[in-house]
Image (cartoon, rainbow, N blue to C red):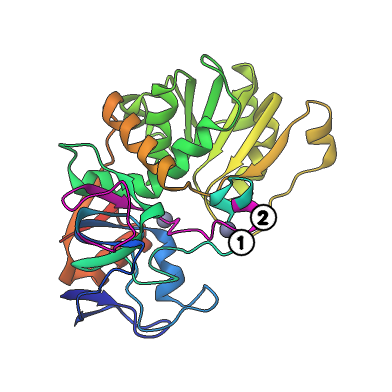
Amino acid sequence: MKAVQATAPGKPFVLAECPIPQPGPREVRVRIEACGICHSDMFVREGLFPGIAYPRIPGHEVVGTIDAMGSEVRDWNVGNRVGVGWHGGHCFTCSACRSGDFLLCARGKVTGISGDGGYAEFMTAPQEALARVPDGMDPAEASPLMCAGVTTYNGLRHAGALAGDLVAVLGVGGLGHLGIQFSHAMGFRTVALSSGPDKADLAHTLGADAYIDMKAEDPSQALQKMGGARVILATAPNSATISRLIDGLGRNGKMVLLGVDSQPIQVSPLQLIGGRKSVTGWPSGHALDSEDTLNFARKTGIRAMVERFPLARAEEAYQVMIGNKARFRVVLTI
Ligand SMILES: [Zn+2]
Ligand SMILES: [Zn+2]
């Protein structure tokens, strides 16, 4: 099969001819139709994740069809349309798994990092890592929902806001354009935040009730004028901006961090204690969370905006994504 590999940290991806993988007893083999490129693929490309064995096929926004199954696979059949996301399987026996919190499994596998991922014609995946993909969903539009989508959807639905509450989405990019749509569809009063006036129209089109240009006004004051945010979904990984936004939280407000920045966030205890405010993170979702994301998106008409590249142009597509030259998400079609 054709596959794109990272051969060593820091080296460009190469297109290679690889053996078609065989599923283990509790695994399926997926004939891949599309795989999104995520900023986290940088972990493989640059060797930023401990213990990666090279060569490695990256990709954890996978959509395809089951074409072979191990002998112990239950509840799935050849021909089922499936997605595989960041969460690539769990152990069932660690403390987190015994409590049912599979997402925090101590031995959790990461698709495209612990094993080969979706920049290929085929991959294998454990049965517990599979999400059902609704019929009729375009694989290229479904694939970003397996990471960018489930991260924003799941982060939002667990953040404690109720219908009608003020929810702010920081960033109108790859994650943010999905976060705004999810927030609107979940019934939150949605305000989008970005720098400059040019994203305002798009934010409104995506469902934002209001837009704050952080260059033109103090975003925390603007949020306080609206009553203070119950949730701020920080999709843009910029710790300095996030620090500026803490005072935009209302009573019991929660800052939910999704994007990774290496710089610390500055917040004083005084900013949090009085209004019982908090800063927290949210890590993607397990397979059923991804399935919920796909179904919710299908039901509410939410769509990822994608730029498509063939598998052979994976390195170029990666550079477009990582260099922030893509407006939203980049997807390899296979
Ligand atoms: Zn990702
Ligand atoms: Zn576990």
At which x and y percent is residue 222? 59, 24
At which x and y percent is residue 228? 64, 22
Q: Can residue 324 be seen at all in this image of the molecule?
A: yes
28 in magenta: no
Q: Look at the numbered disc 1 and give the secondary structure of its residue.
A: loop
Q: Any mark on residue 106, and which?
A: 1
Q: Any mark on residue 233, and which?
A: none
Query: Which residue is located at x 54 percent, y 50 percent?
Result: 102
The residue singled out by tag 2 in the image is 95
Q: Look at the numbered disc 2 and give the secondary structure of its residue.
A: helix
88 in magenta: yes
Q: Can residue 328 be seen at all in this image of the molecule?
A: no
Q: Is mark 2 within 8 Å of ligand 2?
A: yes
**Which corner quadrant holds the N terminus?**
bottom left
User: How far apart, in angstroms, are the residues tagged by discs 2 and 1?
Assistant: 8 Å
Q: Is mark 1 within 8 Å of ligand 2?
A: yes
Instruction: Name above or below for residue 116 compared with residue 203.
Output: below
Instruction: Please name the amino acid that badge 1 sits on.
Output: Ala
**Which corner quadrant holds the C terminus?**
bottom left
Query: Which residue is located at x 39 percent, y 85 percent?
Result: 8
